Amino acid sequence: MRYLILILAIAFGACTKQPTPELPVAVIFKFPAFKVAGSGFLQKGRRLELYSASRPLLDLRLGKRICLNRQCISYKMFNKKILSSSYPPTLIKNILGFQPIFGGQNRRTIAGGFEQRFDNLGIIYKVYKKTLLFKDTKHHIFIKIKEIDG
């Protein structure tokens, strides 16, 4: 009986979804609509909370819709208002998940991560050594996220 309980506990425990860890990060966002820099916590692909001098600056939640400081809109509308309407709707989710963008096109491995360049679009995207850099010179967008060793 003890073994049956142990086996069931292991089987059901392995099936439960583990929460995404919150990583301490330093962030710089520069968009035409707004600019913000601070430190906070990132749940990759799910949520970003930023603070400055212990005051909340930004709460970005990614789900079926994207919520910015409790104002929820579609990803397409987020791109139109904040980024660029020419971007695919999943772009911000991929970036905050430290995942390749544009379906992984032009991806090449670099030390500690990968890089994607789209010279015709003016975009450089790098994920390396706990750092993410997204730069779009045509749309004046800059995103840098660096994991902070705690």
Image (tube, helix red, strand yellow):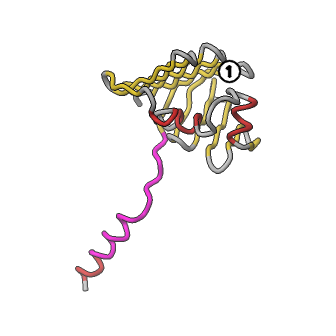
User: Residue at point 71% right, 37% down?
Assistant: 68
User: Residue at point 71% right, 35% down?
Assistant: 78
In front: 83, or 71? 83
Q: Quadrant of residue 126?
A: top left
Instruction: Give x and y (percent) for residue 121.
Output: 58, 19
Q: Hey, which residue is sitting farthest left in the picture? A: 3
Q: Which residue is mark 1?
A: 31
Instruction: Give x and y (percent) for residue 81.
Output: 75, 30
Picture quarter with the C terminus? top left
Q: Secondary structure at mark 1?
A: loop
Amino acid under disc 1: Phe
In front: 33, or 123? 123
In front: 61, or 136? 136
Q: Quadrant of residue 29?
A: top right
In front: 66, or 55? 66
Q: Hey, which residue is sitting farthest bottom in the picture? A: 1
Instruction: Give x and y (percent) for residue 36.
Output: 66, 22
Instruction: Give x and y (percent) for residue 79.
Output: 69, 32
132 sits to left or right of 142: left
Picture quarter with the N terminus? bottom left
Crowd band around label 1 with a 10 angstrom C-alpha radius: few (<14), some (14–19), many (20+): some
User: Residue at point 64% right, 14% down?
Assistant: 138
Count all numbered tags in the image, as a single digit.
1
Q: Quadrant of residue 18?
A: bottom left
Whether residue 107 is situated above or below residue 2 in the rendered picture: above
Whether residue 142 is situated above or below residue 46 in the rendered picture: above
User: Residue at point 47% right, 25% down?
Assistant: 132
Region in magenta:
7-22
Does residue 134 belong to the magenta stretch? no
